[in-house]
Image (spheres, rainbow, N blue to C red):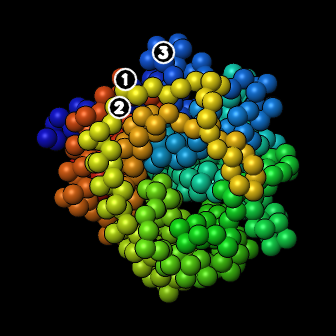
Amino acid sequence: MNGTTNTRILRIREVFEREYFAEGMDLIYDYRTSTEHEHRFDHLPTPEEIALRLPNPCGWVSGMEDSVINGGIALEMYLDADDESNARRIRRGLELCGTVSGVPGFVARSVSPRDGKSFYPESSRDQYTHYVYALWRYFCSAFATEEEKREIAALLVDAARFCETHVTEENDWTLPRADFGSPRSTVCKLWHVNPHEAARLPMFYAGAYAVSQDPHWLDLALRYAGPAADESMKLGVRSYNAFALFQMLCSCRLLHDVLPDAALKARYSEVMRRIDPYLDFNICRAADDMSRVDLRAPMAEWRGISSGKILPGCRHVLPRYPEAYALAARAVRETGETLLASLLQPEPGISPLRREVFRFVLEKFEPETYAPCYGLYLCAAWYKARKLGMEL
């Protein structure tokens, strides 16, 4: 199986690198609406639509909502693959998202390839999590030059200072929009949140400390890290999306590796181990999805979607993904995220069940006809396993 797996991974990676980057941009766009290369991004919003906050202030469903999340996954993959050129390319894309707004510390979800500067004004804790984790990993890698380390230190300190200034009790512990407008959705809240989100705020402060060695950021990280560990242990008797568990692991991993307190390290190791059993639900759901999914299901043009939902509180309109597309996206993405989370554990490993599902998904996956960018996640899991001396 190994030779066949290697061949399929290389094929998936080739399609990913050809189809999900726009010319002149170092960012990964979420999906394509055509398998004709020159028309694959016809759906991406115009600068005028972005200025009008269409379809919503986050760009949800627009095709440019998660470039930072996907970039974080890709940067880790290229580090694991020892691909310096592409790792540096992704780092540049993340830097663009961290600076394009002109508001120090604000991380845009993506940037329009139509003009290289338009972006949606609302970010999320998810984007910040992958941004901080990936740049920290690049900073610690052998690829990072001294100049790049200085640049990353400035970016992560800016993000931490943005949080220190604005993520306060008076502001309901919530990240502001780049335009400082309202309303904001709950994805921007960083404290007094669900257990799987509790460690994000101290993670951002710990990331700033790791790259700057400024004790101010260590003091802030320690202020929140203990209570966050207590909250993180309260995962309920319920299912969690794989992306939420994987992001939780990223935050716990960074805190574990950066904080000097031995007792806190031990607590975060315990939290990470507690996450692992929850992942079996996700891998089994992915296998079930794959038994009935149409991986060729296209994504609809978002401008023509006529159904959706209005989010409580912020009243953002969220167009509804076509059901077949959503199933195809989840099956592949959750497979990769489950395996990546398994490999981020204090004692990384892949259970026979998770390996079997990965191979089942890989055998069915045809990257040439798949609309979302999530073949990336299968490649990222494979490269990380290989880096750790494990076989998928």
- Label 1 sits on a secondary structure element that is helix
Residue 284: mark? none
Q: Residue drawn 50% across and 59% down?
A: 244
Q: Quadrant of residue 187?
A: bottom right
Which of the numbered marks, if any, corresponds to residue 295? 2
2 or 1: tag closer to the N-terminus: 2
For image coordinates 64% across by 44% down, the residue present is 309
Q: Is residue 372 above or below residue 301?
A: below
Residue 158 in view here:
no
Q: Give the spatial CA distance, label 1 vs label 3.
A: 12 Å
Residue with the mark numbered 1: 369
| Mark 3 residue element | helix
Task: Say what amino acid the circle numbered 2 marks.
Answer: Leu
Tags 2 and 1 in contact by the CB under 8 Å rule?
yes
Of 59 and 355, nearer the camera is 59
Q: Earlier in the sequence, mark 2 or mark 3?
A: 3
Query: Along the polypeptide, which appears first: circle 1 or circle 3?
Result: 3
- Secondary structure under the numbered disc 2 in the rendered image: loop
- Against 322, residue 346 (above or below) is below
- Residue 360 placement (x, y as % from top left): 22, 43
Q: Position of residue 280 (x, y in %)?
A: 31, 62
- Looking at the image, which residue is at 35% across and 31% down? 295
Q: Is residue 262 left or right of residue 185?
A: left
Task: Give how far across and how far down residue 17 sits, in percent.
Answer: 44, 28
Determine the CA span between mark 2 and mark 3.
Answer: 18 Å
Q: Residues within 10 Å of mark 1 (few under 14, many from 20)?
A: some
Frontmost of labels 2 and 3 is 2
Left or right: 356, with 105 as reference point: left
